[in-house]
Image (cartoon, helix red, strand yellow):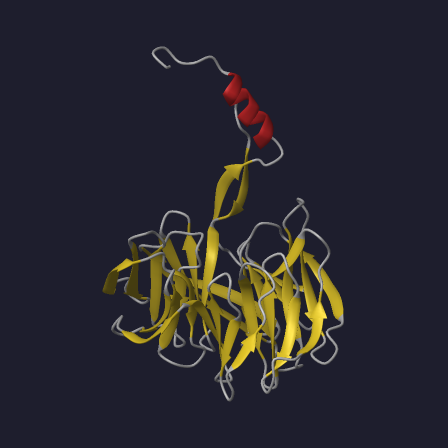
Amino acid sequence: MALKSVLGAAIVEFGAAGSAGIVAGGLHEGTVQIWRLSSEGGVSSGQCLGQFETLFVSGASTLALRADGQIVVAGSSAAAGRLAAYDTATGDKLWERTRLKYPRKLCSSPSRGHFWCGSDSAAHRIDFETGASLEIVRGAQGCFEGQFDHELFETKADANYILRGTKTLEIRRLTSAVLDVAFGAERFCVSESGGPVRCFGYSSAEELWRFDPEPGTHVLRLHHDTADGGFYGVVLRFEQRAPERLVRFDAGTGRSALLRELDRETAHLFLPTTRQLVEASGKVYDLASGQLAATLPFPQREYPDPENFEAWLEAEFEKPPRDGAK
């Protein structure tokens, strides 16, 4: 039985560079593309600056871009995992680190020259320039850093999260993992896998408000918009084949407003410089209105048609064994 294919986004993961307007897109095969995104006079545009081969393997958030857009780090998560840094202008490898145990959840500092790398036993704060560990936080499996000098450490599965900043706070864990964290000037939001979005202040661990998504959904991406003070999220309905959703949360009350439906099963990236959401399909949406602002020429590739995939699997299992097969 021939399996029908459909076109979809080739980019499976994004890395963004603070205010530089530079974006890295990781493709399935280890290729990384570097794009410059801009918006002038209400018109959004994108230019591919180049592409090169890297260590990147999708599935563990192993792509990070320095705040100035000049260095990208890509990795592969395994028992003997690796990370490597590349010059975004030339694709030249700058350094490589090996023997990292399941590196994952790379998080770039919004304004400084380091990134965080999670692992099974510790979170490493790593220098983009040299690859050296500047700090190792034992017992943490990842770290989310915000633009207001706060960090949230994701700890082992049976321990609460730790906020480090003006005060050190313990944030109660509700589910198995943190999906994303968004930091505002006075409060921050945490989204958990299969769980809610919760908002906290920086002076205590008291919950200010909570958004409970409907069963079978969670908020995959979070963003704080400094212009209007609100929080934005991408809601994934993982138990059904339904479009994802862009929603806005009122910072004071947590009241949610649906802005629009999005493409399903595609990577998303919030761009603070232009106040937009970018999809791996190339679609760009304005946060203020939720309207489509542009469609960028991001690469595409062929995928098995999900509508026929189960039938194809059944046909494959019903085939008689090949000669010599046992």
Give the tally of numbered discs.
0
Is residue 74 in view from this perspective?
Answer: yes
Q: Residue at x 47, y 53 (%)?
A: 11
Name which residue lies at 45% across and 78% down: 110
Q: Is residue 90 above or below residue 216?
A: below
Residue 15 appears in which quarter of the rendering?
Answer: bottom left
Residue that lies at the very extreme toward the top in this rendered image: 323
Image location (x, y in percent) of residue 302: 49, 40
Percent position of residue 306, x then y: 59, 36
Do we see residue 146 in this rendering? Answer: no
The residue at 29%/65% (across/down) is 85
Q: Is residue 242 above or below residue 204?
A: above
Left or right, residue 79 beside residue 192 = left
Q: Is residue 95 above or below residue 40?
A: above
Q: Position of residue 159 (x, y in %)?
A: 51, 67
Q: Quadrant of residue 248?
A: bottom right
